[in-house]
Image (cartoon, rainbow, N blue to C red):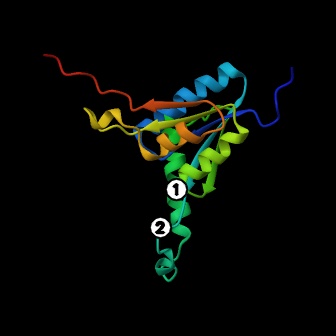
């Protein structure tokens, strides 16, 4: 059976350690599935952005693009794998990633934990993706720092 033209792995990237690890895991899975990976950097204007119009609003997209490129560099080094592409998406991460999941075989997001009891809870974006995505979702934790020797 031929693969659908839209088959891909989407990774939500916000620049956090968890999203950088999500890029690494998503890349491995995309290779195993024989498909491509799209790294999505989502951005939106802040509430009341009309007040920013005098200062210029192009900085919001530029900052998101810089975060996305930095995360890709951290995950893969200077040579981005051939199957990985970047996409800057205007819209909230929750809404954009859930909508994008309609055209993906897997959605990968990072979870920024706080440790302890609070660390058991999913973040708002990862929770929304788990609850509403149209494809399987993998939630990746930040890499653990090495435990201190006792």
- Quadrant (top left, top right, bottom left, bottom right) of the N terminus: top right
* 100 with respect to 22 (left or right): right
Residue sitting farthest toward the bottom: 54
Tell me how far mark 2 sits from mark 1, CA to CA: 13 Å
- Classify mark 2: helix, strand or loop: loop
**Location of residue 113 in the rendering, given as x and y in whole percent from the top left corner:** 34, 37
Determine which residue is flagged by label 2.
46
Disc on the earlier residue, 2 or 1: 2
Please provide percent x and percent y for residue 127: 47, 40
- Residue 77 appears in the picture as rendered: no
Location of residue 83 (image quadrant) = top right
* In the depicted structure, whether residue 105 falls above or below residue 38: above
Front residue of this view, candidates 148 and 9? 9
Which residue is denoted by mark 1 in the rendering?
A: 64
- Is the C terminus in the top left, top right, bottom left or bottom right quadrant? top left
Local crowd at mark 1 within 10 Å, few (<14), some, or many (≥20)?
many
């Amino acid at each position: 059976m031929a693969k659908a033209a839209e088959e891909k792995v989407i990774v939500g990237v916000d620049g956090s350690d968890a999203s950088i690890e999500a890029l690494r895991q998503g890349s491995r899975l995309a290779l195993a599935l024989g498909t491509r990976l799209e790294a999505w950097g989502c951005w939106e204007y802040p509430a009341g952005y009309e007040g920013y119009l005098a200062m210029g609003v192009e900085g919001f997209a530029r900052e998101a693009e810089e975060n996305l490129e930095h995360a890709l560099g951290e995950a893969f080094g200077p040579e981005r794998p051939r199957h990985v592409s970047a996409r800057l998406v205007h819209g909230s991460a929750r809404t954009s990633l859930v909508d994008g999941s309609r055209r993906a075989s897997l959605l990968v997001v990072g979870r920024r934990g706080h440790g302890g009891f609070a660390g058991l809870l999913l973040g708002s974006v990862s929770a929304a993706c788990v609850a509403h995505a149209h494809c399987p979702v993998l939630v990746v934790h930040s890499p653990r720092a090495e435990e201190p020797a006792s």
